[in-house]
Amino acid sequence: MKFTSLATASVALTAAAIPSAIAFVPNSIQNAALSSTRLNVQMEAPTKKIPKIEQLKIDSNYLRKPLGEQLATEEIGISKDAYQILKYHGSYQQNNRETKGPKDYQFMLRLKQPAGELPPDLYRLLDDLSAKMGQGDLRATTRQCFQMHGILKGDLKTVISSIMNIGSSTVGACGDVSRNVMTTPAPFVSPEYKYAREYSKVFAQLFRPMSPAFSEIWLDGEKAASVETWAKEVEHHNVDEKMLYDNGRGIILADSTEPIYGTQYLPRKFKIGVTVPGDNSLDIYTNDIGCVVICNDAGELEGFNVMVGGGMGRLHNKENTFARAADHMGFVPKEDIMEVLKAIVAAQRDHGNRDVRANARMKYLVHTLGIENFTKLVESYVGKEIAPWRPMAEWKYSDWMGWWEQGDGKLFYGQHVDNGRVKDEGSFRLKSALRAIVDKYNVHSIMSPTQSIIFRDVDPKDKDGIEAILREHGVAPIEEVDPNARLAMACPALPLCGLAQGEAERLMPSYIERMRALLDKMNLPGEEILMRMTGCPNGCARPYMAELAFVGDGPKSYQLWLGGSPVLTRTAYPFMAKMDREKLEETMEPILAMFIQQRMEFEAFGDFCHRVGSEAIEKYSETYVLGSVTA
C-alpha cells in the first residue's frame, strides 16, 4: 500500500474500513505477534520523484551544505538553497522591500529559549549585539524568544558564536524540527508551575537537532564555552539516554547522527507547549503537541494530559489548508511521557505529507486519520495504549502583566511590549529602561507568549526602583495601557518579511485606537476584545484563535475573522473575504450593534460571534443603519 499524500492515505483508509489502529510496523517487528485488533500495514516508499526541499535536506549532509560554502563568499546574501538550510541554524535572509534598487540583504536571527527564560547576561549580550550589529532594536516573538533584525552576513558568525558561547542557542529556532518549547510564563513556585518549566526544557533537549554542523560552522568545530543553561538544569532526567532508547518499534532510526530526525528531518516545523490546568496564557491548542501537567493532591507529578494536531498556518483561496485547534489525545504517566512524545514525532516524521508542503504539518495527519486512529498509530510505536484524558480545571487566559506575588516572598512584574518591539523612539525608551533594570538589579527575565517580558524573582524592596526606571524612560505603567492593546498581537510583516501581503505591526496600534474610539462611541468603554493581526495567512501571531482578527490579503485589505474564544480554545471563522483597511469602523459597527442588542449576560464578543454565526451577523449588517445603536 502506497501512501504518497494525505489525500490518498485518507482514501486508502476509508476503502480498507480500518476498525481500529493503523500500525505502521518497522521491518524488525513485522512478524511479531500483535493484538488481533491491529491491522498491520507495511508502508512502501513513494515511487515518484522526491520533492526538491526534501532532496535538499538529504544533500545538505546534516545541515552543512551549501550553507558553509555560501557563507564564505563575498556576496552580501546567500543562495536560495543555502537560505533553506540556514533556517535550521536559526536565521532568515531578508531584505527591505521598501528600498529601491538592488536587494540589501540582511539577516534575522531568532533565539531558542525553552520556557522563555532569559538570564541577565544573555539579555545584556542581546542588547549589545542588536546595537552594534543589528538594527538597534529587539523583537519579542509569539513563541517566547527574542529575534534580532538587520544583521549583515559578515557579522552572522560573530553574533551566533557569541550567543552559543554564553550558554544559549539559535539551533532549531527555525526549520523542519521541534521549535522553541513554550510554557506558561508565570514564574509561580507551586509544584505544577515548576514541572511545566522543567519539562519544557526536557522536551527541548529531547528533540534538539544533533548534527555537528552547528558547531562546525559557527564555532569552527570547537565546543561552546558554556553548556546551554537549560541542558544543565535537566541533566538528572538523563534525556540523551531516553532519546536514544530504542524499543524496536520504529521510533529510532538507523542513523547515528540524527536518530529521531534522520536525513530528511520532519516534513514541516513542529511546535510543543507545556502548561498547567486552567492556564492557557500560551495558546496551548495551537501546538502540534500540548502537554498539561497533572499532579496529585500532594503536588506530586503523575503525568500529562496530551493534545495533538494544532496549528495556524493556511493559504488564501486554498480550502485544503486551514487553521486547527488540537484534539485531546489522552493521559500519559510521567515515566512514559518522553517515549510517547518520541512516538508522536515519529508518526509525523514517517507519515506526514512530504509531497505537498502546504499540507505537511501534523494537524493534517491528525485531521485525515481522526484522533482515534492517530492515537492508535502512536500506540503502535509505543507498544501500549494511551489512557483517557483526565478531567481538570477550566481554561482561563491571563497575560500576567503587572505585579504578582510568586509564592516565595518574591515578586514578578510583567512589562507590556506593544507588538513585541523593544526599542527607543523619542521620549519612549523601553530598550534603555529594560537594560537599566537588568544592570541595576541583575534580574532574570521570561519572554511571554504575547510578545511581552516578565521580570522574575524581584525583591519587594526593589519594586519602587523598577517602577521609577520605567517612568523615567517614558514607559507607561500597566494601568494606563489599553486592555485591548494588552490582548492584541501582530506579526512584524512589512517591510522585512518576504511573505507579508500587507501591514501588521505598524498598523495594529492605529487599529486598536480606532476600535477603542468606536467602542466608546457605542457606549462600550469597558469592553475587552482579543484582537490579532497578520500580514499574510501563515498565522504567526495566531490570528485564527482571536475573537477578532485581521489577516492581510493585499496591500490595503484584510480578511476579517470572528468567533474565537476569549480563553483560546477554538478557532475563529472567516466572516469577510476582503475588508478595505480604511473601512474598519463601518465594517465593525453593525457587528457591535448586534452584539449590544443580542448578547447574553456577561457574554464575551468572541463567544457571541461563535453562538450566532456568520450568516446571522451578515444578515443583520445588511439592514443596519450606521449610528443607530448604542449600549
Image: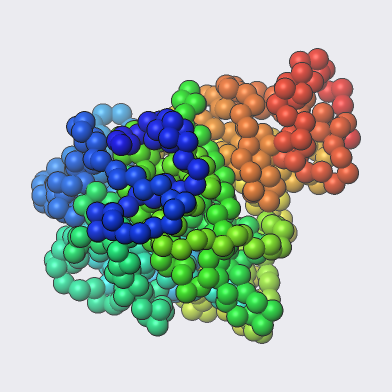
Q: Is residue 627 above or below residue 338?
A: above
Q: According to the image, what is the colour scheme of the structure?
A: rainbow
Q: Residue 543: horizontal and vertical position, in percent?
A: 57, 40
Residue 89 is at least partly visible in this image = no
Query: For the C terminus, which image quadrant?
Result: top right
Q: Is residue 53 above or below residue 158?
A: above
Q: Is residue 423 above or below residue 191?
A: above
Residue at x-position 62% and y-position 46%: 488
Q: Residue furthest top?
A: 623
Q: Residue 570: horizontal and vertical position, in percent?
A: 63, 44
Q: Please give left or right for residue 615 compared with residue 183 in the image.
A: right
Residue at x-position 44% and y-position 53%: 36
Q: Residue 441: horizontal and vertical position, in percent?
A: 52, 79
Query: For the N terminus, which image quadrant?
Result: top left
Residue 14 is at least partly visible in this image = yes
Q: Please give left or right for residue 23 compared with residue 49 in the image.
A: right
Along the line of sight, the residue nearer the viewer: 315 or 17: 17
Q: Residue 31: horizontal and vertical position, in percent?
A: 28, 56
In the picture, residue 160 is in which quadrant? bottom left
Q: Please give left or right for residue 375 compared with residue 213 in the image.
A: right
Along the line of sight, the residue nearer the viewer: 373 or 499: 373
Residue at x-position 14% and y-position 53%: 61
Along the line of sight, the residue nearer the viewer: 545 or 580: 545
Along the line of sight, the residue nearer the viewer: 229 or 387: 387
User: How many numbered dots are placed on residues in this image?
Assistant: 0
Q: Please give left or right for residue 494 compared with residue 310 in the image.
A: left
In the picture, residue 254 is in which quadrant? bottom left
Residue at x-position 50% and y-position 61%: 385
